[in-house]
Image (cartoon, grey):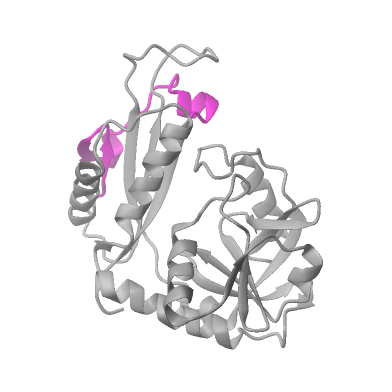
Amino acid sequence: MSFVILNGELIKREQATIDIEDRGYQFGDGVYEVVRVYNGKLFTGDEHLQRLEKSAASIGMQIPFPVEQLKDQLVQLIDKNKLTLGTVYLQFTRGISPRKHPFPPENVKTTFVAYTREAGRPEEKMLQGVKAIITEDIRWLRCDIKSLNLLGNLLANQKAAEAGCDEAVLHRDGLVTEGSHSNISIVKGGKVQTHPANQFILNGISRKVMLAICEREGISVIEETFTVDELLKADEVFLTGTTVEVMPIVEIDGKQVGDGQPGQLTRKLQEWFKLEIEAQCGSL
């Protein structure tokens, strides 16, 4: 038996129902986060919840709980479900209201749901690396908001799945932005290069952890756009994300990246990232 949170109340999953006129269901009018859990503890939980608040503010919506109170609820949910290794998904929508495009009256309450899921670390893929394809970025122009509007991401990721790949690398007019569900970086001459944190990408929490590691370890970082051609000529390519941590890409559109093996710097970043996890959540 599993439990979920519905509007701040911890209940059995089978008891949770959402009204058909919830604006998240009808418009995708809401925001969400996915937080990693290791050893029953939230990893970078504060950072995820702060980003949730920022995303909500960007669409004119207010989260009705302070970050600490929201965090306490998620910890209770993790404990109730006895989750050791996995994720917590949480989302807020603008609430239940007759279907009209303008925002509902201010007295309409947001809808809050959260649930847990068991998920192991993708250790084999992290060791061997994954394959990716390149496809056009057809999403809207506010990708910095972690909204429920993910159709563009889904279509890109489906292309990757149909090609037998794990990720789709997105580009706008030849400039690489990010993956369909991850941030992407390249390594050239020992330097890490990644798209700047603007409206064209989601500023990933794992991306920020990676950048902090690079600064601490003296790894040069260039936060500038790079082209598809530069991507294909990179020494190393890797993804960062909540569920993938630091994931090497070894093949793109059937072309080998570097020598076809995860690169040395990517390997170091994986180890340093693991240490960050263990510092917050205990030994893996």
Task: Residue 73: name its quadrant.
Answer: top left
Q: Does 41 appear in magenta?
A: no
Taking the image as shown, residue 260 lies to the left or right of residue 28, namely right
Residue 48 in the image, given as x and y percentages of width and height: 37, 51
Task: Residue 138: name its quadrant.
Answer: top right
**Number of numbered tags placed on the structure image:** 0
- Which portion, as a residue range, is magenta? 1-29
Q: Does 6 appear in magenta?
A: yes
Residue 152 in the image, given as x and y percentages of width and height: 66, 43
Question: Which residue is depicted at the point 26% across and 60% down?
Answer: 83
Taking the image as shown, residue 122 lies to the left or right of residue 156, namely left
Q: Who is closer to the viewer here, 129 or 62?
A: 62
Residue 145 visible in this rendered orientation of the protein: yes
Whether 130 is drawn above or below 151: the answer is: below
Task: Residue 222: name its quadrant.
Answer: bottom right
Residue 227 in the image, given as x and y percentages of width and height: 77, 63
Whether 21 is drawn above or below 249: the answer is: above
Residue 163 visible in this rendered orientation of the protein: no
Residue 214 in the image, given as x and y percentages of width and height: 48, 75
Q: Who is closer to the viewer here, 26 or 238?
A: 238
Question: Which residue is depicted at the point 79% across and 76% down?
Answer: 255
Quadrant that contains the C terminus: bottom left
Question: Which residue is depicted at the point 39% across and 64% down?
Answer: 119
